[in-house]
Image (spheres, helix red, strand yellow):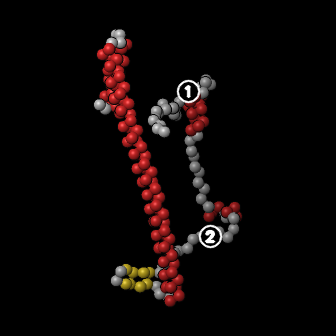
Amino acid sequence: MTLYEITEEFQKLEDLLMTGEVTEESEALLNQLMTAEGSKLDGYLMVYANLKMMEEGAKNEAARLAKKAKTAAAAIDSMKGRLAAHFALTGTKSVTRPLGKIVLKSSQGAVELDVSTDEIPEEYTVTKTVTTINKKHLKDCLKSDMPGLREDASKYAHIEEGKQYIQIY
């Protein structure tokens, strides 16, 4: 019996008990449903525990692999640094080998400021304006008892009903 079916049977039994009296048959059905529900919930808890362990194991594996990738990236950077130093010392610009090609390139370079940003003329600046919605204030207005405040705010937003959720310990 599924949890959905158990829930439906509980609802039917509740309707029956509200309209009639408690019989041995209805009491037996109640005990049967409670046993089935307990067994089903125990199953859910076992599956939940297994999934939590699997999730934790996957997170640990992801962390291990991320560390491994970071180590490999650092080794690659170190090798490239040694190759760049070697090419610079020997005056080599490019080498082609059977496994690949190595080229010493130069970046365009980054702009480094020699003065504080306050000293830079406006012609070298860009002004950015960022507008964000103050949702806390909007929510406070939507909940307000002050005449007009709630009505004005409700032209622009509404409060969604809170969602229910399960927490398992």
Q: Which residue is mark 1?
A: 151
Q: Residues within 10 Å of mark 1 (few under 14, many from 20)?
A: few
Q: Secondary structure at mark 2?
A: loop
29 left or right, relative to 103: left
Q: How many marks?
A: 2
Rounded to the nearest angstrom, the CA distance separating label 1 from label 2 is 52 Å
| Residue 120 place in picture, x, y as percent | 67, 64
Q: Nearer the viewer, residue 54 or 83?
A: 54
Please indicate, yes or no, whether residue 12 appears anywhere in the rendered image.
Answer: no
Residue 68 shows in this picture: yes
Of the numbered discs in the image, which one, if any, rests on residue 13?
Answer: none
Disc 2 packing (10 Å; few <14; some 14–19; many ≥20): few
* Residue drawn at point x = 53 percent, y = 30 percent: 154
Instruction: Looking at this view, name the residue that lies furthest to the bottom.
Output: 90
The mark that comes first in sequence, 1 or 2, is 2
Give the position of the N terminus as an image quadrant: top left
Q: Which residue is tagged 2?
A: 112
Q: Residue at x 52, y 34 (%)?
A: 156
Kind of residue at badge 1: Glu
* Residue under the image location 45 percent in, 65 percent down: 69
Labels 1 & 2 near each other (Cβ < 8 A): no
**Residue 115 placement: quadrant:** bottom right
Residue 48 lies, with reference to residue 5, above or below; the image says below
Q: Is residue 68 above or below residue 131?
A: below
- Residue sitting at x 45%, y 35%: 166
Residue 29, x across and y down, in percent: 32, 20
User: In the image, is residue 161 above or below residue 106?
Assistant: above
